[in-house]
Amino acid sequence: MSAEMKNFELPLGLERFRSQFEATIKPYIEIQTHVTREVNPWQSKFAGFPYLPKNFDYPKTPEGEYLYLLAQINFEKVPHLEGFPEKGILQFYISERGDGFGCDFENPTIQTGFRVLYFPEPDLNEDHLLTDFSFLPTFWARNHNPFRISRSSPPDKKDCFALTFKLKYSPITTADFKFDKLIGEEIWEACEENFCEENDCENNGCLLWEEYHNRFEKGHRLGGYPFFSQNDPRELLAEEADQYILLLQIDSEGKTTDSIQIIWGDVGRCNFFIQESALRNLDFSSVLYNWDCG
């Protein structure tokens, strides 16, 4: 284990569990955002307009409603993460259906209210790409999407979140369904010893988990461990031999300096999962989509 991986900082009350946490460390890609409209079609982004060849049908629901670009990742600009593509453009689309942002919680792998597309060999000739998206209703004016706008300074139709990436390492999150098995249930005694009587922190009054959450669980990421406001949906699939791993997490993000914010319900987060064999084969047809909030 490298020094960078081993010398991570734990809350003092969890130091006696360091060996268990060390054994769970995984690499992931941290994603940072900033609002801009100066992006090209193949750039990584949240929201905005997608990379699409002119002969490619824009994704829709079975009822013919247009989906909206949630995220686009150009892996050529992402630090290499083992098991993930080294090139190509991966896209995530969602719909406005109901209040679920296109997620069918009963059938989370059925891509009717959402879509995942992968272009292994992007064409960087803009003359070959769809650039006129005037057929799309103005995204920011819609009600059922995770992007919130400032009414005093509404964004331009071309605005989006440009993305930057950094390779980092993190131990398992407390919400991962394997947490108790890998860390040990006795860790909850440490939580009881550090309980906040006012119960004014996010993690059920446990000050240790509040500190741990802020260090290792918040934010947007590719790979690594997911975090949930409620339950890990993969627990119901734990018996499957081919386990689902985190593909992409998009957290809630409120920046007072920006005209656009990302808010999943009551400040929750969105996760996309994929089976390891499917990721190796660059098969994104059975991605599991889930989001939750407090």
Image (tube, grey):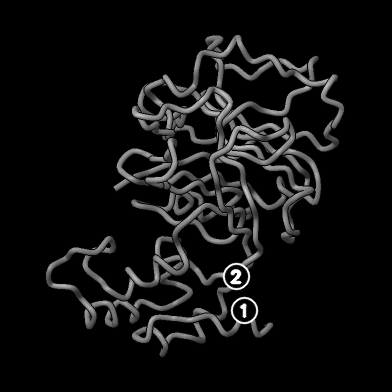
Question: Compared with residue 183, is residue 282 higher up or lower down, i.e. above or below?
Answer: above
- Residue drawn at the location 53% of the way across and 61% of the way down: 225
Q: Quadrant of the N terminus?
A: bottom right
Label 2 crowd (10 A; few <14 / some 14-19 / many >=20): some
State the count of labels.
2
Alpha carbons under labels 1 and 2: distance apart: 6 Å
User: Is residue 254 visible to the viewer in this orientation of the structure?
Assistant: no
Q: Which mark is residue 5?
A: 1
Q: Secondary structure at mark 1?
A: helix
Label 1 crowd (10 A; few <14 / some 14-19 / many >=20): some
- Residue drawn at the location 58% of the way across and 73% of the way down: 25
Q: Position of residue 58 (x, y in %)?
A: 67, 17
- Residue drawn at the location 42% of the way across and 47% of the way down: 253
Q: Residue furthest bottom?
A: 16
- In the picture, measured across the screen, residue 99 lies left or right of residue 88, that is left
As shown in the figure, which amino acid type bears the numbered disc 1? Met
Q: Position of residue 49 (x, y in %)?
A: 63, 26
Q: Quadrant of residue 278?
A: top right
The answer to whether mark 1 and mark 2 are in CB contact below 8 A is: yes
Q: Position of residue 123 (x, y in %)?
A: 85, 30
- In the picture, measured across the screen, residue 43 lies left or right of residue 62, that is right
Q: Quadrant of residue 91?
A: top right
- Residue drawn at the location 42% of the way across and 19% of the way down: 141
Query: Which residue lies under the disc numbered 2?
Result: 169
Of 89 and 39, nearer the camera is: 39
As shown in the figure, which amino acid type bears the numbered disc 2? Tyr
